[in-house]
Image: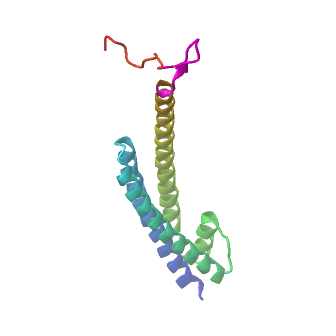
Amino acid sequence: MEAQPALTALLRTLEQEEAEIVELIQLATEERSALIASDFPAVDSVTERMLQVAERIDRHEQRRQQLLNELGNAGAGLNEIVALAENHSVGGFPDARERLLERTGELQDLQEQNAQLILSAAKLRERWLAMLTRLANPTYGAGGQQQANESRFLSRSA
């Protein structure tokens, strides 16, 4: 395959990957809202859609690697692709690289925020479970008889 058509196809592939990443950003924002609202069915739905987008990104990545193999630059990163395109007078790659880097950084930030929300929710549930478990566990008195646990998490005045 000639370099210019392959590079043009590669640029289109990068642009398609960027569009998929933008969709992931939108889904990660939806996921954050669902996590905050503790809307677990919505979280499941968003997660399923994110997996579908990730599969499409994988296909774009395979296409990108195929085009790089055809160009004799297997495994080249974005910087090497930009240099290769410049050597063949094909434009658009520096802007595409910058947009991809910006979008992936944005997605990473959102995913880290979502992971923190999930971790906080899990810790909160764990604390509640531990507290409720302590309330439900009977104690034994001096005579070996079971007694109800007297601890409370709400005061009588509440």
User: Measured from the top left, where is residue 124 in percent x and y?
Assistant: 47, 33
Q: Is residue 39 magenta?
A: no
Q: Position of 153 compared to 94: left or right?
A: left
The figure's colour scheme reads rainbow
User: Measured from the top left, where is residue 147 in percent x and y?
Assistant: 49, 18
Query: Residue furthest toward the bottom?
Result: 1
Q: Considering only vertical position in the picture, is 136 above or below 90? A: above
Q: Considering only vertical position in the picture, is 57 above or below 127? A: below
**Residue nearest the viewer, comparing 144 with 52:** 144
Q: Considering only vertical position in the picture, is 58 above or below 106? A: below
Q: Considering only vertical position in the picture, is 146 above or below 76? A: above
Residue at image location 34% in from the left, 42% down from the top = 37
Residue at image location 58% in from the left, 71% down from the top = 86
Question: In this view of the protein, can residue 92 be seen by the observer?
Answer: no
User: Measured from the top left, where is residue 58 in percent x and y?
Assistant: 54, 70
User: Measured from the top left, where is residue 92 in percent x and y?
Assistant: 48, 69
**Residue nearest the viewer, comparing 138 with 156:** 138
Please give the count of numbered marks on the rendered protein. Answer: 0
**Residue nearest the viewer, comparing 91 with 122:** 122
Q: Position of 76 compared to 16: left or right?
A: right
What is the quadrant of residue 24 in the picture?
Answer: bottom left
Query: Residue furthest toward the left?
Result: 158
Residue at image location 49% in from the left, 74% down from the top = 13
Q: Position of 53 compared to 1: left or right?
A: left
Question: In this view of the protein, can residue 7 be seen by the observer?
Answer: yes
Residue at image location 52% in from the left, 57% down from the top = 101
Q: Which residues are magenta?
A: 136-147
Q: Looking at the rendering, in which quadrant would you find the C terminus?
A: top left
Q: Looking at the rendering, in which quadrant would you find the N terminus?
A: bottom right
